């Protein structure tokens, strides 16, 4: 007998069991998918920075480097995004053939099955480089290597299934897609009405037990050209052919698209992007049970399988594309601001331009830091579900802000479409990333903290498991042990938060990180504040916190900032504490700290229990929200990182695709280099109040060689500033008949004149 357990813990146990909300099977399976990593340290309130800094960086093998400098660069040279969009509405046939031949669809498939066997980081680097050349090609390549038949077969497929299908996927013989979203089930994918009824039927001339499938899916990338469809549906066994249970749950299976009853081939046009995407349907499609991924034993396990695969894939594809988009925006916008003049000076000198440009640069630095750290976790075999959600949400959201800023600075140059517009298509595509793989609104309000509070909290999942234990005595024993550890942790965290807040983090733990040491101290302070604040919200709201979506979103924002800023600090450390890059790090920290402090203030202002809110204000924010964001000095220095050709500029915007052609990006880079190289000559001209190089040569202000360089630079700038225009008949068929009539009379007049 235990006095504590029987007289103190037992009443708490009974109360908690009564108020704990029921958890659906899909919620439980989502929580069980993947694992936790650095997010658990952040949730503890006392992160171990030495552990973070000791994590090995994600690195490429020599084979992976050769692929990036070989087939990937070659593919980039084959791509013309304007023609893909305007003329072809698809990748040309030779590009499809090249992608298949070079096994782009098999990057993640092990070599034993004919794939390339690349690491998550290599997968990320390929997507990143392709994204900076062609979004159509990047999406086409990334989808088969993310959530789809290949990933699911590798994780859950039976050996015979792997041997049959993976080599075909790796070689491009089969083009995969995955059908999850349906008209009835978008973000709430578990509410799908697509069905698979277990019954007897004929398949390829033999009678067997299988599934008769009926479905309607939409938004399926690669669907219109797919030959192998991964399908999620709800399985039922009304005749009890495989067991006593009738409703078996979500199941995933492989559907060759040539089977009778499969309707495939129509296309969507998502935000004017022309990667293959469309709906598909199935009417009474019969497959044997061994077409279920993993076989009959995996009946009803599809949701957990999907969530497990998504825990990895969601941390790679869209974050890689988004990091590329932000870096691309930083590189192009810095160059354009440098060469574009208004009122006689470069627009990069205007503080109104510096502010959004610094935001783009800081975002590029932050997103690539977080991408690399997440890939390091994935390379090490972790599948951090909460971090993957953070990455998908914040990478796409921050890319949206960076691209909007880039559009604002470019002005009309980025608005007028045509072959010379290197930014407009990326701007159009942003909503696609925001929406897919879990809409950002849902992810922010329900997933990041909703899952993080349970998965990453040191004790909450154990407590919930004990409360849900069917054996009440066993559950009470387990709950008693974990509850009092939780209580002790809470008191420790409370005193940490109090001490660190009242001393402004002066004595909070931090490694010796040079100029960045103070940033670690502040993150230690905020981590403790977050942990105690989360505990108090969970204690006072319990299951009701699940319905307080705005509060949950604010907690999620703090957890996200803690992770992203940790990544920025690790990047600065891993890259050798480059002094030139410190302004980007400062911008990230000041912006992130402002968000954290504002979210704390909003949580305290909106907690229903006002007594607890007052205690929390005393503990974590006694002096209010004090961080204002980046100073003008930091903004100026951060923006300057991309205004001159330099190693620092290349570090902030590394490994983007570049093709020497006459396209808009190539023209911009050429003009940027020439303008930077002739800066001293231009200064001499301005000092002499001259604009004509020939006149400056005559007056001895500059040499003829200098004049030639200046003329070349001005011509290059003019080529960049130039925008596209089109003949009316090239834009609309309405004008084509009139143009033909005009041409007829023109030719007739020429003939008469000749006679």
Image (cartoon, rainbow, N blue to C red):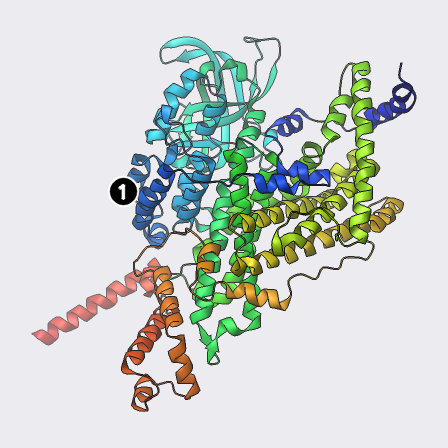
- The quarter of the picture where residue 635 lies is bottom right
Left-right relation of 238 to 463: left
- Residue depicted at x 37% and y 69%: 722
- The quarter of the picture where residue 39 lies is top right
Left-right relation of 747 to 271: left
Residue 639, position in %: x, y? 53, 65
Quadrant including the N terminus: top right
Residue 15, position in %: x, y? 86, 26
Relative to 527, residue 331 above or below: below
- The quarter of the picture where residue 488 lies is top right
- Residue depicted at x 54% and y 59%: 579
| Residue 412 visible from this viewpoint | no
How many neighbours does mark 1 have within 10 angstroms: few (below 14), some (14-19), or many (20 or more)? few
Relative to 442, residue 593 above or below: below
Residue 294, position in %: x, y? 49, 18
549 or 460, nearer to the observer? 460
353 or 541, nearer to the observer? 353
| Residue 700 visible from this viewpoint | yes
Quadrant including the C terminus: bottom left
Q: Which residue of the protein is positioned furthest toward the bottom in this rendering?
A: 699
Left-right relation of 239 to 614: left
Relative to 481, residue 495 above or below: below
Q: Which residue of the protein is positioned furthest toward the left in this rendering?
A: 755
Write down the residue under mark 1.
94
Q: How many marks?
A: 1
Residue 176, position in %: x, y? 41, 31
């Amino acid at each position: 007998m235990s006095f504590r357990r029987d007289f103190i813990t037992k009443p708490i146990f009974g109360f908690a069991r009564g108020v704990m909300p029921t958890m659906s099977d899909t919620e439980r399976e989502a929580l069980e998918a993947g694992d936790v990593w650095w997010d658990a340290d952040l949730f503890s309130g006392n992160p171990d920075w030495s552990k973070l800094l000791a994590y090995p960086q994600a690195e490429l093998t020599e084979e992976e480097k050769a692929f990036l400098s070989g087939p990937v660069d070659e593919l980039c040279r084959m791509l013309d995004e304007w023609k893909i969009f305007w003329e072809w509405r698809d990748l040309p046939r030779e590009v499809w053939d090249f992608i298949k031949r070079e096994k782009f669809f098999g990057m993640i498939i092990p070599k034993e099955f004919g794939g390339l066997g690349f690491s998550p980081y290599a997968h990320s680097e390929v997507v990143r480089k392709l994204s900076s050349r062609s979004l159509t090609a990047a999406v086409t390549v990334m989808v088969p290597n993310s959530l789809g038949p290949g990933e699911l077969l590798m994780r859950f497929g039976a050996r015979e299934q792997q041997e049959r299908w993976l080599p075909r996927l790796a070689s491009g013989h089969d083009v995969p897609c995955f059908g999850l979203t349906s008209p009835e089930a978008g973000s709430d994918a578990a509410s799908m009405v697509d069905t698979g009824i277990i019954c007897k039927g004929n398949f390829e001339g033999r009678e067997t037990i299988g599934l008769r499938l009926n479905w309607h899916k939409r938004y399926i990338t690669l669907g219109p050209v797919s030959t192998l469809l991964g399908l999620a549906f709800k399985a039922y066994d009304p005749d009890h052919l495989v067991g006593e249970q009738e409703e078996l749950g979500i199941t995933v299976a492989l559907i060759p698209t040539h089977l009778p009853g499969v309707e495939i081939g129509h296309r969507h046009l998502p935000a004017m992007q022309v990667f293959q995407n469309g709906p598909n349907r199935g009417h009474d499609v019969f497959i044997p049970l061994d077409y279920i991924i993993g076989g009959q034993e995996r009946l009803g396990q599809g949701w957990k399988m999907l969530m497990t695969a998504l825990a990895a894939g969601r941390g790679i594809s869209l974050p890689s594309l988004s990091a590329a988009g932000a870096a691309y925006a930083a590189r192009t916008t810095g160059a354009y601001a440098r060469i574009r003049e208004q009122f006689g000076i470069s627009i990069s000198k205007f503080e109104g331009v510096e502010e959004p440009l610094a935001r783009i640069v800081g975002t590029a630095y932050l997103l690539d830091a977080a991408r690399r750290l997440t890939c390091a976790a994935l390379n090490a075999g972790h599948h951090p579900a909460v971090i993957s959600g953070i990455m998908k949400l914040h990478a796409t959201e921050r890319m949206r802000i960076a691209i909007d800023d880039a559009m604002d600075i470019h002005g009309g140059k980025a608005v007028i479409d045509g072959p010379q517009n290197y930014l407009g298509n990326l701007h159009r595509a942003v909503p696609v990333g925001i929406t897919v793989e879990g809409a950002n609104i849902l992810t922010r309000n329900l997933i990041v903290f909703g899952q993080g509070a349970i998965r990453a909290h040191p004790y909450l999942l154990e407590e919930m498991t004990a409360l849900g234990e069917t054996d009440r005595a066993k559950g009470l024993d387990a709950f008693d042990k974990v509850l009092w550890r939780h209580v002790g942790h809470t008191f420790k965290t409370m005193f940490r938060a109090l001490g660190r807040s009242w001393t402004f983090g002066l004595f909070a733990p931090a490694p010796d990180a040079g100029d960045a040491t103070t940033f670690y101290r502040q993150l230690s302070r905020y981590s403790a504040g977050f942990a105690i604040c989360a505990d108090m919200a969970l204690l006072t709201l319990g299951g009701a916190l699940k319905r307080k979506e705005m509060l949950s979103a604010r907690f999620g924002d703090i957890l996200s900032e803690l992770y992203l800023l940790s990544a920025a600090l690790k990047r600065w450390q891993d890259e050798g504490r480059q002094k030139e890059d410190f302004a980007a790090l400062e911008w990230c920290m000041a912006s992130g700290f402002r968000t954290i402090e504002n979210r704390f203030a909003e949580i305290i202002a909106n907690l229903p229990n006002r007594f607890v809110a007052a205690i929390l204000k005393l503990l974590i924010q006694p002096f209010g929200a004090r961080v204002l964001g980046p100073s003008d000095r930091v903004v100026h220095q951060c923006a300057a990182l991309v205004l001159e050709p330099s190693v620092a500029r290349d570090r902030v915007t590394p490994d983007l695709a570049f093709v020497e052609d006459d396209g808009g990006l190539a023209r911009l880079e050429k003009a940027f280099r020439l303008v930077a190289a002739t800066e001293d000559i231009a200064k001499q001209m301005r000092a002499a109040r001259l604009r004509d190089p020939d006149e400056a040569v005559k007056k001895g202000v500059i040499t003829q060689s200098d004049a030639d360089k200046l003329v070349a630079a001005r011509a290059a700038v003019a080529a960049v500033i130039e925008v596209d225009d089109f003949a009316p008949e090239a834009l609309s068929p309405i004008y084509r008949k009139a143009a033909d009539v005009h041409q007829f009379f023109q030719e007739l007049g020429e003939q008469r004149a000749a006679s």
